[in-house]
Amino acid sequence: MVVSTTCMPSRKFGGDLIHFARDAYGSIEVVDTFGVRTLHFGTPARQSAMCLQEPDRVELPYVRAMLSALLFHPQPSDVLLLGLGGGSLAKALFQHFPACQIDVVERRGVVVEIAHRFFGLPLHPRLSVTVGDAGEFVKQAGRLAAYDLILADLFDGEGMASPVAEESFYFGCAGMLRPAGVFGINLWGSQTAACNRALDMMRKAFDGPAFRLAVPGRGNLIGFSLASEPKRAAMDAMEQRARRLETRLGIEFSRFLWALKAAGRAFPKSESRTRGG
């Protein structure tokens, strides 16, 4: 049963509560605070955010950091997003890559409705949303090798959702990536043991290097894995690529690239297959 109410504004999480819903997984709140609309799953943590004056701008730093996957694959034609939230990733890819097909899997149907109604998620044939469990979707999809990018943002009101802790989830995602594909996942950095386990499972599942990107000033840690070992020439061209993408999307890709290089994960020596943490 879903309870959904558009509210007369009342105070919640430091802002005005404009919509409340409850389903089998818990409560969902939409809050407006000083011109920014945020999505919450029963806690102050912001699951998504949108500037009301600039709704196409990617508001949250961790979402901008997840788009660093474009540094490795700058022209995706097929993308799978696991977890929707307010749809920030889907909107950015839809807007800036008009030839791209975007498939989304979101466990909660009411979240999909809220993303369309309150966060401007478009209704379009290029954007397909499936209501279902991401872990089950990956298991049933098999080895399709159908996607250039797979980006997972799987959180609930308690923290990282259960597929993040399952090794089969990462192997399933690896089987769905094309040879030059990129997998990225949003992790909560304060859960150190869980993050380390997730990164270790990524190293086992994917043939290319695995690395991490700590989001500056935030608790998010973005893990990335490549489907195969990248060509050296492509890696050498990343600074120019970062500048082009930065101009195109208005996202600080040069800063993220610097952080990746500083972490020493994205650029392993070609003769080494060791991808230790």
Image: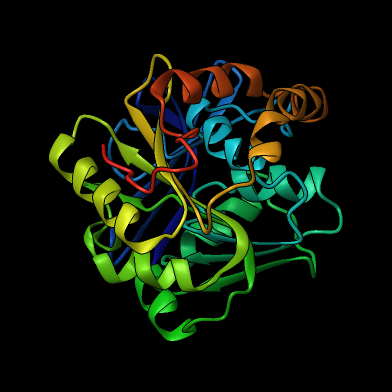
Q: Position of residue 276 (x, y in %)?
A: 27, 40
**Among the 4 quarters of the image, the one containing residue 238:** top right
Judged from this view, the residue extending furthest toward the left is: 193
Q: Where 217 falls versus 85 (above or below)?
A: above
Q: Residue at image x 57%, y 81%?
A: 144
Residue farthest right in this picture: 98
As drawn, is 143 to the left or to the right of 200? right
Please tell me whether residue 10 is drawn above or below residue 154 in the rendered image.
Answer: above
- Judged left or right of residue 43, residue 194 is left
Q: Residue 201 sits in which quadrant?
A: bottom left
Vertical order, 24 against 258 (above or below): below
Q: Residue at x 33, y 32 (%)?
A: 45
Q: Position of residue 188 (x, y in %)?
A: 29, 36
Residue 114 is situated, as x and y percent measured from the top left of the image, at 55, 53
Q: Looking at the rendering, in which quadrant would you find the N terminus?
A: bottom left
Which of the pair 218/214 is nearer the observer? Answer: 214
Report whether residue 214 is seen: yes
| Residue 36 pos. (x, y %) | 57, 24
Left or right for 196, reference 272: left
Quadrant containing the C terminus in the rendered view: top left
Q: Is residue 53 visible?
A: no
**Residue at the spot x=55%, y=15% of the render?**
34
The structure residue drawn at horizontal position 55% and vertical position 73%, both measured from the top left corner, is 130
Count of numbered circles in the view: 0
